[in-house]
Amino acid sequence: MPGDLQLRLDTHGAEHRSAAISGEELAALQALADSVLVGRAGVRVFGHESIDHVLGPQGSVGRLAMAHLGEAAQPVRAILFDKTANNNWSVGWHQDRTIAVRERRDVPGFGPWSTKAGVVHVEPPFEIIAGMITIRVHIDDCGPDNAPLLIAPGSHRMGRIPAGEIAEIVRRLGHEACFAKPGDVWTYATSIIHASERAQTPRHRRVLQIDYASTTLPRGLEWLGVLH
């Protein structure tokens, strides 16, 4: 159940699909979440054979990514999130600007570098971010009281936005809440301005968030990836 505005990926930068994955795929994601989250707020997903078929070219999520990015689309980063009474946080308005890579290679236009949970990250030229999409697969209900993703419609078309200008752009563009039911999928431009508030009524709100890209990185840089 999206908000008042019927959002479209090309126009607004985000799009909702009800019951976009099969019951078998949802069960696989539920089993993965049950096994790896265990009270944690978030965990990076890498090399889990149980969901390769969901994210790969034959799965519902993989096919959706290819529909937007072409046959070269590949999952390059995936994180499972869960907001509960014990793990309830907010994220301010921002753009995602970094990618996860296998190792550091100094390439012009890439930087600064950082390491998060042992994974090397780098800020690439923004056109790489602008060519990516992010897919959020909802395992649980996500209504107005359970911290839905918030997006600023149209902000994905504005390029790299200085952090000091983001609040004014959100005020001008307004924002939409991305409500969902189990098995629903939200696809949004990775470059869109987005945020998330603390859950008003915290309970399980498990989401698998996957970044997809169709570009090859230059000069030996490699996406970390998600699949084997």
Image: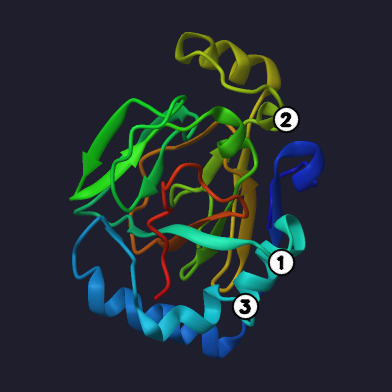
Residue 151 showing in the rendered view: no
Residue identifier under label 3 = 21
Q: CA distance from mark 3 to mark 2?
A: 26 Å
Q: CA distance from mark 1 to mark 3?
A: 19 Å
Proximity of marks 3 and 2: CB atoms separated by less than 8 Å: no
Numbered disc in front, either 1 or 3: 1
Q: Residues within 10 Å of mark 2 (few under 14, many from 20)?
A: many
Q: Residues within 10 Å of mark 3 (few under 14, many from 20)?
A: many
Rendered image quadrant of residue 182: bottom right
The kind of residue tagged 2 is Gly
| Residue 40 located left or right of residue 204 | left
Residue identifier under label 2 = 154
Residue 219 or residue 99, whichever sits in front: 219
The kind of residue tagged 3 is Ile
Toward the front, the furthest residue is: 219
* Numbered badge on residue 71: 1
* Numbered badge on residue 202: none
